[in-house]
Amino acid sequence: MKKTSLITRAVSLFATGFIFVSVTVLLGSCNGLGNSSGEVDSTKGLKDYYEDYFLIGVAVSPRSLEGEQAELIKKHFNSLTAENVMKPGPIHPEKDNYNWADADKIVEFAQANGMKVRGHTLCWHSQTAQWMYQDSLGNLLPKEEALANLKDHITDVVTRYKGKIYGWDVLNEIVVDDPDPAKVYRETSPWYKVAGKEFIPLVFQWAHEADPDAVLFYNDYNTENPVKRDKIYNMLKELLDAGVPVHAVGLQGHWKLNDPTEENLRASIDKFASLGLDVQVTELDINVNLGREDPDSTFTPEREQKQIDQYKMVFNVFREKKDVITGITFWNVSDRGSWLDRRGKKAYPLLFDENLQPKKAYWEVIKF
Ligand code: G3I
C-alpha cells in the first residue's frame, strides 16, 4: 500500500473513531449515561433497579397509555393505579350505569405489559357517586338503603377485576387532620353521616367476600403526622382486633421539600408494620411549591437540590424497610402534568421532567 493511502486511511480511521466516541458520549448524556453515578444501564428502568425491593407503580389516566408516555410507563413501572377512573363517581355514576371502558383499558394495558394493578378506591368522601347515599332532592337515604348501594358497588367492581387487580384501596381518608386527638373520623363524609363508623368494617368485609385474595388497604395522607398517625393506628388496631380483613396501609406520600422528616417517616412505617400490616407508599410526589408565600413556584437550583435530598432520603428509608414495604407508586407520570399544578403554578414533583426525561433526582434514586 502506498504511503499516501496509508495516511489517508489512518486519518479516516481516526475520524471515524472520533465520530463514534462523540456520538456515544452525546447519546450517553441524552440517556443519562453521563450522570454522576457512572455505571448506568440505559435499558433498565426504575422498576428493574428495584426488582429485589418492591413494586414501582404510577397513577395513570387512560390517555397516558398512548404514545411516548406509554413507552416511559412500560420502561419504568410494573404497577398501575387509575388516577380517577375507578373511583365510585366516575365508574358508577348512576345506579344502573357503570363506566367500565376506561378502567378496563388500564387493566388491559397492565396485563398486556406484565404489570400489576392497584385498585383505587372503593369508598371515599370525594369523587363519590351521590345517588348511592342521597335522593334526588339531596336528602340522605336511610342507612340500610345507602349501605346496600355501597355493598352492591363494592361487590360489582371487585368481582369484575377479581384476579386482575391484586389489591384495593378499600377506604380512603376517613381520618381527619384535626390536631385534637379526640377527633378521629371525618364526620363530614357522606358515609359517616349515613352510618357513623359502622360502615368502616363493612366495606372491608364486602371487598373480602368479593375477592378473598385481594390485599385490602386503608389509604390516607399526612400519615407521618404523629397525631394523625396515632389516630389511624388506633382505628386499624380496633379493626384488626375485631377480625376485620385489613391487610395493608397506604401512606399516600404527597410530600414537600421539608416534610416528612426522616424520623417521622420511619416512625410511621414502623408503627403500622407493628400491626402486621404491609405498607405501601401509594401516591408519591414531592412538591417544590412552598405554598401561599410562593407566587411563582419556579424550579430553582436550590429547590432542585432540596428535592433531590428529599427523594434520596425517602428511598433510603424505603430500601431499608423493604421487608414491610411492598410497593411505591408515583402520583402521575412526569412534571408535564401533575394534579398539584394549579392556576399557573407548577409543582415539579416527580422524577421525570416535562420532556419525559429523568431528572437529577432520578439518578440519585437508582444509585445504591
Ligand atoms: O373528568 C371531569 C370532567 O368531565 C370535567 O369537565 C372537569 C371539570 O372540572 O373535571 C373533570 O374531573 C376532574 C378529575 O380530576 C379528572 O381530571 C375533577 O374536576 C378533579 O377534581 C379531579 O381531581 C382529582 C382529585 O383526586 C379529586 O379529589 C385528581 O385528578 C386526582 O389526582 C386526585 O387524586 C387524589 C387521590 O384519589 C386520593 N388522594 C389524594 C389525591 C390528590 O388529591
Image (tube, helix red, strand yellow):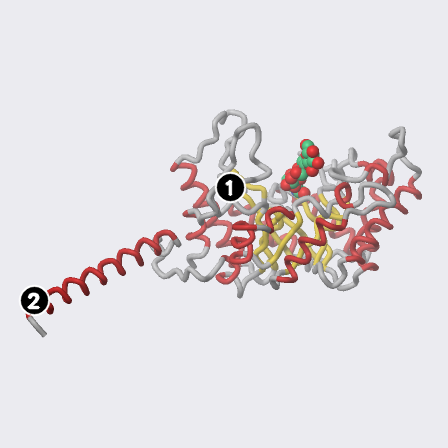
Q: Position of residue 11 (x, y in %)?
A: 14, 62
Give the mark nearest the N terminus, 2 or 1.
2
Mark 2 or 1: the one toward you: 2
Query: What is the distance, in whole Å, between disc 2 and disc 1 at their CAs?
Result: 56 Å
**Front-most of residues 118 and 246:** 118
Quadrant containing the N terminus is bottom left
On screen, residue 360 versus residue 315, left or right, reads left
* Neighbour tally class for label 2: few under 14, some 14-19, many 20 plus, Cα within 10 Å: few
Q: Find the residue positioned furthest to the left.
A: 3
Q: Give the residue displayed 6% in from the left and 70% down from the top.
A: 3
Q: Amino acid at mark 2?
A: Thr
Circle 2 sits in a helix, a strand or a loop, which is it? helix
Q: Position of residue 78 (x, y in %)?
A: 58, 59
Circle 1 sits in a helix, a strand or a loop, which is it? loop
> Does 313 appear above or below 291?
below
On screen, residue 6 versus residue 254, left or right, reads left
> Does 100 appear above or below 137?
below
Q: Give the residue displayed 76% in from the left and 50% down from the top.
A: 100
* Neighbour tally class for label 1: few under 14, some 14-19, many 20 plus, Cα within 10 Å: many
Q: Position of residue 307 (x, y in %)?
A: 46, 42
On screen, residue 213 versus residue 36, left or right, reads right
Pointer 2 residue:
4
Q: Position of residue 281 (x, y in %)?
A: 60, 51
Q: Which mark is residue 335?
A: 1
**Numbered label tally:** 2
Disc 2 vs disc 1: Cβ atoms closer than 8 Å? no
Q: Quadrant of ligand 1?
A: top right
> Does 49 appear above or below 342?
below
Q: Give the residue displayed 72% in from the left and 45% down from the top.
A: 172
